[in-house]
Image: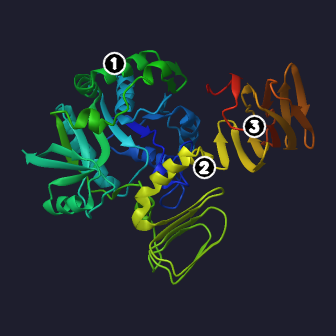
């Protein structure tokens, strides 16, 4: 099986920890915090049922460098990373992976499609389910994994099945039903939670997609053929791909195919789709409280409290989620955390940057931390890794003043190149091309003071970039 990892989600239901430009799969949310959700998904590929350990990973164009960096942190895995220039859901994403797998392999190549943000506790049970799924896939079945529900959960989709010759045949998909209906589903025993994991021959998937969604197939094929392979990245063509229909595998293929089957998976599976789901799988104190960071409890129970920086003292509180980051705090009843995505949508309507970015923003060259901001000014701490450089760029609305506090900088300013050491500075006027480079062996740290009429991150015109950004 060829593993395909879907890492394109925005994780809005785990806001404010998860943001659209730094979603939940890149965070260590489970266990001892050693590995992120994406890293754990990749480490799971050590299964004996998977012959090809080098996955295809599909992610947003802006996340490619984070994927590469995180995989370097767990060994020598060298994936093919498909960079989507626009979000078009899982059906087009898997189509791109299928085209890529057939490009490298043969028509019998079988895809194992895994979301990057799931938890599987019993990997031995997972291996056995993989073996069963692969046998069915080789018989030209489109296989999905179903989880037997142990409670009436409304946050998951459901699959209704019937059994034929020891195989669970798919009858119907139900997308996140009402609680009254869910209770009857659990009691009947005919329903599974929809895990969002699949095993299918690459060619069969494309054939089914072409049959049921011919326009989507055509646009995906066009986008793939117009794409560019650069190192281990596949840059998908924007013009073709943005015309593609936005749809999930379930809607585009699984609900329509006559070849859909379910393999039951009992492996301690969790889709970390909410703060309450994370509370369920986390270690708790004797009162049912989960704490991450500096937290103290008195007379409180069944809470999820997470502090990134400050001490949080909790007194007489029950069934609450409180999550604090540097720039935002969420307080919610644990029974209503599915509505976090609604508050994110409301914030987006107000163009709040907190839906997209954290105060500290990772970049392929290092990171920046927004220290302060006010009317017509903004202050950032910028850290550039050894040997790295920012893009050659220009701004229409802001000037910048750079002060070196650690290391050595090479500053390109118009036609000039300036070497700066600690306590030296450079001024970049509005409209002047500029670039910052770290030529040294230690991190370069500067304080940047921006001033002007508009200070948004979209006021960047790039002329050259080492990381392939637009």
User: Residue at point 22% right, 45% down?
Assistant: 173
Considering every residue shown, the one lying at the far bottom of the view is: 299
Quadrant in the picture for residue 222:
top left
User: Residue at point 39% right, 25% down?
Assistant: 244
Q: Which residue is mark 1?
A: 218
Q: How many marks?
A: 3
Q: Are marks 1 and 3 in contact (CB under 8 Å)?
A: no
User: Residue at point 51% right, 24% down?
Assistant: 235
Q: CA distance from mark 2 to mark 3?
A: 29 Å
Q: Which residue is mark 3?
A: 386
Q: Quadrant of the C terminus?
A: top right
Q: Is residue 266 left or right of residue 90?
A: left
Query: N-terminal of the two: label 1 or label 2?
Result: 1
Report crowding for label 3: few under 14, some 14 to 19, many 20 or more residues within 10 A (C-alpha): some
Q: Is residue 91 left or right of residue 321?
A: left
Q: Are marks 2 and 3 in contact (CB under 8 Å)?
A: no
Task: Name the secondary structure under disc 2.
Answer: helix
Pick the residue in front: 17 or 111.
Answer: 17
Report crowding for label 1: few under 14, some 14 to 19, many 20 or more residues within 10 A (C-alpha): some
Q: Is residue 348 left or right of residue 94?
A: right
Pick the residue in front: 18 or 338.
Answer: 338
Query: N-terminal of the two: label 1 or label 3?
Result: 1
Tell me: residue 436, above or below residue 27. Answer: above
Query: N-terminal of the two: label 2 or label 3?
Result: 2
């Amino acid at each position: 099986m060829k593993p395909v990892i879907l890492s394109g989600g925005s994780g809005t239901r785990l806001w404010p920890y998860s943001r659209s430009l730094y979603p939940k799969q890149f965070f260590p949310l489970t266990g001892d915090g050693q590995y992120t959700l994406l890293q754990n998904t990749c480490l799971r590929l050590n299964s004996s049922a998977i012959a090809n350990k080098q996955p295809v990973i599909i992610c947003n164009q802006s996340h490619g460098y984070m994927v590469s960096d995180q995989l370097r942190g767990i060994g020598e895995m060298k994936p093919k990373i498909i960079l989507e220039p626009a979000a078009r859901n899982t059906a087009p994403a898997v189509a791109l992976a299928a085209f890529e797998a057939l490009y490298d392999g043969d028509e019998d190549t079988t895809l194992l499609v895994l979301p990057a943000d799931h938890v599987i506790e019993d990997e031995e049970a997972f291996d056995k389910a993989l073996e069963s799924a692969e046998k069915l896939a080789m018989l030209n079945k489109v296989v999905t994994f179903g989880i037997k529900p142990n409670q009436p959960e409304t946050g998951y989709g459901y699959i209704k099945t019937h059994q034929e010759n020891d195989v669970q045949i798919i009858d119907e998909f139900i997308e996140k039903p009402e609680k009254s209906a869910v209770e009857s589903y659990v009691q009947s025993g005919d329903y599974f939670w929809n895990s969002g994991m699949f095993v299918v021959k690459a060619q069969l998937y494309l054939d089914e997609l072409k049959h049921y969604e011919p326009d989507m197939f055509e646009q995906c094929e066009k986008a793939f053929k117009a794409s560019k392979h650069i190192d281990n990245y596949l840059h998908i063509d924007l013009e073709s791909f943005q015309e593609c229909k936005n749809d999930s595998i379930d809607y585009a293929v699984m609900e329509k195919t006559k070849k859909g089957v379910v393999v039951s998976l009992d492996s301690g599976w969790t889709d970390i789709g909410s703060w309450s789901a994370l509370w369920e799988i986390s270690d708790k104190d004797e009162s049912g409280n989960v704490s991450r960071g500096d937290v103290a409890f008195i007379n409180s129970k069944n809470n999820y409290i997470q502090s990134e920086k400050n001490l949080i003292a909790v007194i007489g509180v029950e069934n609450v989620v409180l999550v604090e980051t540097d720039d935002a705090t969420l307080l919610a009843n644990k029974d209503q955390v599915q509505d976090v995505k609604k508050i994110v949508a409301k914030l987006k309507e107000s163009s709040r940057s907190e839906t997209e970015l954290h105060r500290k923003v990772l970049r392929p060259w290092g990171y920046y931390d927004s220290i302060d901001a006010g009317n017509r000014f903004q202050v950032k701490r910028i850290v550039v890794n050894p040997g790295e450089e920012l893009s050659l760029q220009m701004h229409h609305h802001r000037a910048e003043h750079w002060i070196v506090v650690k290391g050595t900088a090479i500053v390109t300013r118009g036609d000039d190149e300036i070497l700066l050491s600690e306590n030296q500075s450079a001024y970049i006027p509005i409209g002047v091309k500029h670039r910052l480079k770290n030529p040294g062996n230690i991190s370069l740290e500067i304080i940047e003071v921006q001033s002007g009429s508009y200070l948004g991150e979209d006021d960047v015109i790039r002329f050259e970039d080492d990381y392939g950004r637009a």
